Amino acid sequence: MDTTVTTGVKENVWGGGNRPLGASYGKLMMWFFLVSDALTFSGFLAAYGFSRFKFMDIWPIADEVFTHVPFFHGNYPMIYVAFMTFILIMSSVTMVLAVDAGHKMKQKAVIWYMFATIIGGAIFLGSQAWEWATFIKGDHGAIETKGGRILQFVNAETGERVALADFAKTIPSERVDHERKNGIWFYGETALPSFSVNEVVAGFKANPNILVRTETIGEDGHKTLLTRQESLDKLANASQVVEGANLIHNEYGSRLFADFFFFITGFHGFHVFSGVVINLIIFFNVVLGTYEKRGHYEMVEKVGLYWHFVDLVWVFVFTFFYLV
């Protein structure tokens, strides 16, 4: 009598075989990482959204902040940001082509498409660094009141912003720094703005065609423009001159806007930088024929997933900061 008992081979893992969802272990772990990273970005953008909703009446208008284009002087709202977005999206296209070429085992095509992706990422990073520098430096300057409100200056006839340098008066006695020859060599003084409050106020009084614009947005969607007398009354509460934006002061409006801008765009920029570095490593492996020897280009596909995620996140960041 045959008493042999046969057992089936255990192959079911999550009911999908030993390759859940048909994905390799590496790609599955990449998806896990991207999901967790997506939740992180979602939290940041949600915090930005709540803060903007709370301070909606004083939130800076993107069209009045991001108006610069390298090597050109003038007002070009959102033009350069749109260029940056286009470059990043096109780098995602070249990454798709690199992955497709890898599936077909076309080494030279993978090399060229990955090279184009790296160049696109580098251009985006350089553009973002330039945008940060411009945002930090500022171009017009403003006055911050004792209550922390921002006062900007505009031409009464055209309604365009006027830079402090265009009307502020120079008062020599107001520009005194601590110097070693004065015996105060041990005291380090912070960098002074280009003009003092008194110089700005004196220049404003001498130019009747200039008015003050507050950071408060009216029902018409524009910042509130004060009369000449209201402008003088506001300047009586002036505390300091603000030039550009940082984590403490912001000539464009609410300080929270600058805080979120530096944090979220910086966090995304770090992801882009990491993607460029990883792409470079994979690129040199492709050139050396590493994946040809392995018989597949799965590493290109995995880094492609990360790169597409970075591009997708930028679409949301672009929408939140620049469009809405």
Image (cartoon, rainbow, N blue to C red):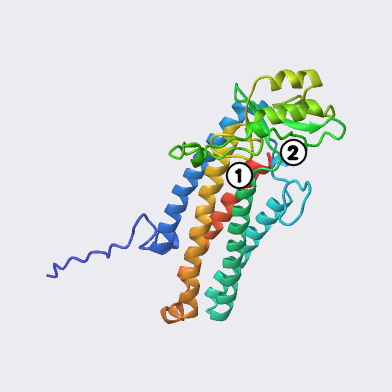
Mark 1 — residue?
Answer: 136
Q: Nearer the viewer, residue 219 or 249?
A: 249
Task: Give the foreground label among 2 and 1.
Answer: 2
Above or below — where is 140 with respect to 301? above
Above or below — where is 74 with respect to 274? above
Q: Position of residue 114 (x, y in %)?
A: 56, 71
Q: Position of residue 266 (x, y in %)?
A: 53, 48
Q: In the picture, which quadrant includes the C terminus?
A: top right
Q: In the picture, which quadrant includes the N terminus?
A: bottom left
Above or below — where is 301 with respect to 272? below
Q: Amino acid at mark 1?
A: Ile
Secondary structure at badge 1 equals helix
Asked whether, in this view, residue 310 is left or right of residue 25, the answer is right
Which residue is the extreme one toward the left?
1
Q: Residue 163: give its label.
A: 2
Secondary structure at badge 2 equals loop
Q: CA distance from mark 2 to mark 1?
A: 15 Å
Asked whether, in this view, residue 208 is left or right of residue 140, the answer is right
Q: Position of residue 173 (x, y in %)?
A: 64, 31
Which residue is depicted at the point 60% across and 48% down?
A: 132
Q: Amino acid at mark 2?
A: Ala
Which residue is depicted at the point 62% across and 38% down?
A: 193
Q: Are marks 2 and 1 in contact (CB under 8 Å)?
A: no
Asked whether, in this view, residue 3 is left or right of residue 135, the answer is left
Q: Position of residue 202 (x, y in %)?
A: 74, 27
> Which quadrant holds residue 115?
bottom right
Which residue is depicted at the point 50% across and 39% down?
A: 43
